[in-house]
Image: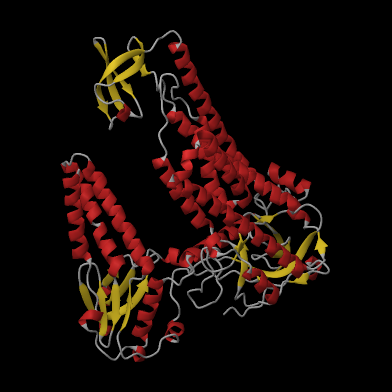
């Protein structure tokens, strides 16, 4: 546990009347979080799945010479709105509600009919829209409740933000990135219009001619049409509508020929417009939202709360704690922040001109040259310590929070500078506030440090292990063997690997098989090893040593031969033997996903507990493991099933 006192904030930087955000009030605030059902992940998945279902089931447009198919800008706009909505559901609930309305109205305008009410795919899509809207409204209501609780804790005191925060501007980078993307969208639209206009000018004096279809190739998306003694090959997105010996109408001008029902193709330009529009509007909305929230911090006095903050050790997030939690044991919320600087205009001008203060050293160099070298050396030393994992954790600091905290808002705070405690830093958030709760809603909680220090904010453990004494305290002597093996998360990873392998085999064998297909197939069958491991790995500790069930065999390693048991960042569980040999199980799960789900990663836990048994012989089981406890390699079975799947694909295609 961290026992050091928080770095104090100078009394002259603490506004009068500021209230402490105490643990009792903070716990009430923290308990007010959206229900798990309202997490954006479920809404995004449901919208995406129903959209795919609707796209497959929705009838293709009917193209005729009287009503030819051209550029579908309305459909492009609706699809762009849908993609933006999927993004806004996660980032900006209010804009997502607007996006949902645009998507629904766009579908109703584009191709709705009364008969669609009986279609299951349409009902599923509308249900997904309604579920998403309900989740968004619930999240906004919860944010309003959090705001009310924070206002109650802050009391009547209100103060303007520090001058440095007034100079802090948000959204510039987003505007810079949005401009070229929107320009790309405009360019794509202009080019598509050029293609359409060129076709209109060329086809103005042409009359459609009818011909007999002699070839309809659904793979190449072309048909061949015989007109008189000439055969024209033309592109079409719907070759199944032109079976052989049917009639098709063409516009013909010498060697130039197009279907009268599909006169030109601007799909490529439409995709360019879609990409530019989605990216540009996403950045533009982020810029406007950031600029709006930044200005809200500048408008009049704001409620203030006295808290504790700490910078994340791994990802630089700012974690906020209650004012009466000096050990920083229970985080409340987190966000990313940047320093806000206040400089005199003269200093800024000097800095821009690069003139400095004109002081020179005895040999003509700047007086601060030596200091610069020392700073560079110190910076390199700190970088080296960070890369080695030897840097100390950032300190806990007293802080004054400006603004009412709630999910989705942005804040400013004043705290001692972590690098120079004698200085005071003003920082402004650059990402939205998120509550520090377990599971998907909170984005992970601070994990313990590898040396046993508590509360390392940053969303996960750094490389290392928990102290042996700490792990041993959670274990009790056992007579029966101890086992660690595949759990639900690892088996889900194995299922994904098997699906990827099955899809790869299908893709490679769908076309004509050649000797070039052999090498990718060999690579795909190597997935069998990883999938077999993650589906059925097991380590069993008994009286005499460890049984390690891998993909192809079960190995026995005696305690006297074991040097260490560890879990690597990549997901490997490694038993280190004497003479620098290792037995590796790879992979044994997905620690990142387990943390996101609010669970303790099972692979690191298994490694820590097995290592604790190695170092504490008195905790080892007293019995030997039987055959049923030793595990079974799954590789041969998975390899046989994969081979049968490959044979089935060859027979079916």
Say how many tags the image has: 0
Q: How is the image coloured?
A: secondary structure
Q: Residue at x 20, y 71 (%)?
A: 553
Question: 268 or 251: nearer the eye?
Answer: 251
Where residue 623 sits, quadrant-wise, is bottom left
When the figure is inspected, residue 606 is found, relative to residue 523, above or below; the finding is below
Residue 122: where, in percent of width, then height?
47, 45
Please state if 574 lies on the left or on the right of 348 as rendered: left
Residue 619 higher or lower than 92, as above or below: below
Q: Is residue 65 visible?
A: yes
Residue 156, given in percent of the width and then of the height, sits at 82, 66
Q: Residue at x 37, y 88 (%)?
A: 616
Residue 285 relative to residue 185: left or right: right
Which quadrant, please, contains the N terminus?
A: bottom right
Quadrant location of the C terminus?
A: top left
Vertical position of residue 509 compared to residue 327: above or below: above
**Residue 266 spot, x, y in % from top left:** 44, 26
> Where is residue 65, by image quadrant?
top left
Relative to 465, is 428 above or below?
Answer: above
In the picture, measured across the screen, residue 552 lies left or right of residue 238, that is left
Q: In this rendering, does residue 405 appear at all?
A: no
- Residue 26 location (% of width, % of height): 67, 72
- Front one among 512 and 374: 512
């Amino acid at each position: 546990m961290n026992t050091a006192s928080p770095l104090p904030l100078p009394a002259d930087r603490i506004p009068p009347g500021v209230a402490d955000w105490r643990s009792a009030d903070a716990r009430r605030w923290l308990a007010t979080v959206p229900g798990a059902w309202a997490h954006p992940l479920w809404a995004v998945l449901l919208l995406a799945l129903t959209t795919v279902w609707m796209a497959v089931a929705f009838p293709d447009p009917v193209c005729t010479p009287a009503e030819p198919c051209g550029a579908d800008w309305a459909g492009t706009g609706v699809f762009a709105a849908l993609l933006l909505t999927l993004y806004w559901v996660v980032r900006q609930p209010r804009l997502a509600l607007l996006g949902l309305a645009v998507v629904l109205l766009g579908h109703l305008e584009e191709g709705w009919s009364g008969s669609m009410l009986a279609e299951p795919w349409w009902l599923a899509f509308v249900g997904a829209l309604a579920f998403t809207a309900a989740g968004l409204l619930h999240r906004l209501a919860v944010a309003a409740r959090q705001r009310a609780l924070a206002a109650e804790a802050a009391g009547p005191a209100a103060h303007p933000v520090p001058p440095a925060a007034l100079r802090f501007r948000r959204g510039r980078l987003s505007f810079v990135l949005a401009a070229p993307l929107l320009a790309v969208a405009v360019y794509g639209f202009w080019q598509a219009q050029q293609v359409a206009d060129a076709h209109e000018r060329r086809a103005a004096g042409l009359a459609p001619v009818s011909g007999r279809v002699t070839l309809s190739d659904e793979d190449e998306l072309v048909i061949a049409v015989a007109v008189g003694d000439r055969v024209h090959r033309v592109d079409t997105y719907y070759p199944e509508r032109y079976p052989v010996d049917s009639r098709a109408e063409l516009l013909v001008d010498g060697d130039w020929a197009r279907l009268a029902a599909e006169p030109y193709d601007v799909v490529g330009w439409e995709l360019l417009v879609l990409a530019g529009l989605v990216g540009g509007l996403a950045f533009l909305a982020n810029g406007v939202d950031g600029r709006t929230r930044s200005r809200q911090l500048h408008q009049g006095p704001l409620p203030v709360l006295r808290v504790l903050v700490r910078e994340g050790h791994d990802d630089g997030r700012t974690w906020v704690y209650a004012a009466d939690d000096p050990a920083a044991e229970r985080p409340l919320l987190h966000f990313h922040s940047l320093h806000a600087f206040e400089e005199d205009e003269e200093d800024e001008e000097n800095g821009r001109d690069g003139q400095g203060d004109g002081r020179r050293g005895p040999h003509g160099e700047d007086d601060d040259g030596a200091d610069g070298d020392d700073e560079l050396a110190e910076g390199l030393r700190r970088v080296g310590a960070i890369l080695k994992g030897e840097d100390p954790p950032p300190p806990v600091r007293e802080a004054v929070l400006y603004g009412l905290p709630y999910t989705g808002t942005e804040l400013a705070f004043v705290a001692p500078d972590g690098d120079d405690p004698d200085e005071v830093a003003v920082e402004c958030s650059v990402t939205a506030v998120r509550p520090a709760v377990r599971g998907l809603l909170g984005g992970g909680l601070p994990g313990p440090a590898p040396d046993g220090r508590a509360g390392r904010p940053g969303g996960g453990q750094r490389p290392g292990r928990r102290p042996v004494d700490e792990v041993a305290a959670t274990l009790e002597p056992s007579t029966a063997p101890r086992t660690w093996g595949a759990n639900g998360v690892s088996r889900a990873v194995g299922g994904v690997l098997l699906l990827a392998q099955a899809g790869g085999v299908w893709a490679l064998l769908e076309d004509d098989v050649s000797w070039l297909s052999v090498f990718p197939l060999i690579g795909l069958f190597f997935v069998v090893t990883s999938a077999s491991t993650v589906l059925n790995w097991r380590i069993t500790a008994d009286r005499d040593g460890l049984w390690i069930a891998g993909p192809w065999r079960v190995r026995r390693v005696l305690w006297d031969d074991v040097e260490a048991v560890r879990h690597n960042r990549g997901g490997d569980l490694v038993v280190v033997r004497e003479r620098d040999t290792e037995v590796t199980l790879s992979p044994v799960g997905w620690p990142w996903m387990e943390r996101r789900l609010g669970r303790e990663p099972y692979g690191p836990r298994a490694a820590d507990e097995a290592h604790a048994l190695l170092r504490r012989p008195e905790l080892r089981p007293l019995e030997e493991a039987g055959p049923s406890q030793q595990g079974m390699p799954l590789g041969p079975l998975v390899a046989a099933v994969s081979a049968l799947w490959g044979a089935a694909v060859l027979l079916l295609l």
